[in-house]
Amino acid sequence: MNNRIALERPHVGSTSARTATGSTLLVVMVLLLLATLFVVFALNVGSFEQRTSGNDLRAKLAQETAESGIALGVEYLNANRTLFATNDTWRECGASETDFPCGAVPATRRATMFTYMAEGSGGAALADRLLPLQAELADSSVGGFGATRQVGAVLCRVREIPATGATPAGTECTDSLDDASTTWVATLVSKGSLTGEGSSATVSQTIGAYNIFAAGVGTPPLVASGSVDVGGGMQVVTSPDAAGSGVPTSIWSRLDVGANGTPNTCYFDNFIRQGGSNSGPPGYFDGIAVCDTCKCPTDNSLSFGKGADFCEGMDIVDIESDPLNVAGCPTTANANIRREEFPEDLFAFLFGQSAWTDVNRGGIAEGDACTTAALDCHFGEERIILADCKYPHPTTGAEVTASLPADTCYLLNIRNKIHIGDGVDDQAQCDALGADSEGVIWVHEEAIGDLPGFAGGCDRIRGLNQFGSPSKPVALVYDGSLTQVNGLVMYGLAFLREPNSSTTLDPATGGSAVLGVNGNMTIYGAAVVQGKVQSGGGGSAAIVYNKDVLFNLINNPNNINPASIPGSWTDRLRY
C-alpha cells in the first residue's frame, strides 16, 4: 500500500486564479484612469494659467496705452497754452453729465468745468471731445496687438480771489473768463484699448498750472538788495500804488539810495504830458503810451537831484545813516524802513521759490526786531543747495539729477524759456533776440554742471533798440553784471541774479550783480537787482513803471508751468 499523501494542484482554469487576474486588471485600469484625470487636470490648469497670463498681458498693455495718453495729453496742453485764454475749444460740462470725459470729475463742481472740444464742433460727439492726438497705434508698438487711444480733458479755471469781501473757503472753479485767475487745473482722462481683444483701461490724472512769477503787477520799477546810485539824467517813473493805495514807490533798496547829477522820479502822467512837451510828443505803441526821450518835470517830480545831493520824496524807500534831506529840498525824506520790510530773498520775491536763507542775524534773536545797523539781519546770505535737483537735460530731454542751487534748479525747470548758456544754439538764440522775443530769457556766461555757459553773455542785449513788446514782454534773467547799457529799449522785467557759483552774499553789498546804465536806455516795466545799481553819463536813461506791460508778462500763457497734483492719479473709472 502506498502511504504517500497525494498533493492536489489547482487546475489552471480554477476560480481563484481568474479572480486574482481580474483584480489586477481592475487596479491597473483604475490607475490608468486616475493618471488620465491627472493629465487632463494638469492640462486644464496649464490652459487656465496660459489664459490668465494672456489676460494679464493684455490688461497691462491696455493700461500702458492709457498711461501713454496721459503723458501725451500733458505735453499737448503744455505746447498749446493759448487754448486756455478763450472758450473757443471748451464747452461746459452738464451737472449730471457722465459721458467721457466730464464724468471723471466730481459732480459737485462739474457744472463749472469745461470739456475740450474741437473748435466749432459743439462737442456733442465723442470724437469731437478728444484731444487731437494719434489714436490708432501700430501693432508693433503695443506688444504685437493693434490698439487705440482716446484722450480727453476737463478744465477748471480757478476763480480769482476777490480784492475785497470774504475769501472763498476753498478753491473754486468759474465758468466766467472775467472771474478767472491765471491758474488752471485740468483733469486728463485716457482710455486705452486693444483692438478686437476686449481689453481696455481708463486712467485719469489731474495737473495744475502755476504762474512762474510771484511778484505782482505793482512791483516798483527799481528794486535792489544793494545800494542805488542814480546819476546823470536818470529818470524813474513810479509805481503809484506799490506801497498801498495812493502810496507810490520808485526805488526800493535795503541800503542807501544816492544821487549825482540831475535824476528825477515822477508819476507817469507828468512824465508823458509835461516831460514830453520838452522832448517831443509821446506816441502809442502796441496799446501803451511810450516816450523814450521824455523826462520828469522838475516842478512836479517826487524826488530829484540837487547838485551832489538828492531830495528824496515819499517814493524813495531805503535805509541810510542820515535820512534827512538837505536844506532847500521841498519835502522831508521818507523815514528809514525796517529791515523786515525789504525781501529777505529777492529770488523768492520774484518767483516764489526760496533760494537764500538768513543764517546770521547779527546776534539778534529770531523773533526780535532787526536794528538799522544790523546789515545781516533779515537778509538771506546763504544759498540753498538742493542735493537732488531734477531737471530735463536741454539736449536729450532726459531727466537729470544733480546738486544745484534752488534758484538754478527752478530756472532749469521753467518749461518755455530761451536758455542762452545751455550749449544748444546759444549764438543763434542771442542773434535772434529783439522785437519778437517774449517770455523768460535766461543768460549766463558761467558754466553750470555740464552746461557750458555763453562767452560774453550775449553782449548785444546792451544796445537792442527793441527787446520784447508791450503785449508780449520779456523777463530777462541775467546772471551777474550787465553794465555799459546804452540804447536798450526793453518791455518787461530785468532780473540780475547772483551767479550760480556763489554760495554766499555780502550783506554790505547785497550781492555781486551790477546794473550799470550809461547814456540812453529805457525799460518799460521793472528792474530787480541782486546787488547794486549805478548810472551815469549823458542821455536820458529811464525805468518806466507800466502796469499793462507787467500784467501781460505775468499773464502770458507761456509763463504758466504745469505740474501733476499728487494723489490725483486713479484708474477707478471705466469707459
Image (cartoon, helix red, strand yellow):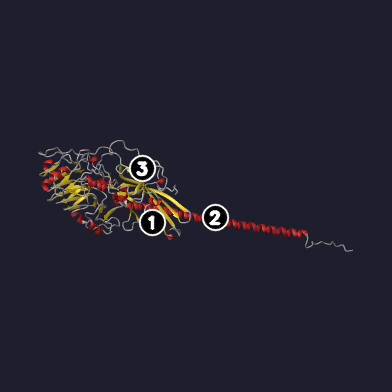
Q: Residue at x 12, y 50 (%)?
A: 539
Q: Quadrant of the N terminus?
A: bottom right
Task: For residue 489, say whether it is visible.
Answer: yes
Callout 1 amino acid: Gln
Q: Along the line of sight, which residue is nearer the eye, 400 or 356?
A: 400
Question: How many other residues sit within 10 Å of disc 1, few (<14), some (14-19) or many (≥20)?
Answer: few
Disc with the residue nearer the chain's start (3 vs 1): 3
Work out whether 437 lies above or below 105. below
Q: Nearer the viewer, mark 3 or mark 2?
A: 3
* Image-based side of 169 in relation to 493, left or right: right
- Residue beneath label 1, please? 134
Residue 341 versus residue 563 in the image, above or below: above
Mark 2 residue type: Phe
For label 1, the SS is loop
Across and down, in percent, residue 146 comes to 44, 58
Pointer 2 residue: 48
Q: Position of residue 390 (x, y in %)?
A: 34, 52
Residue farthest along the bottom direction in this orientation: 2
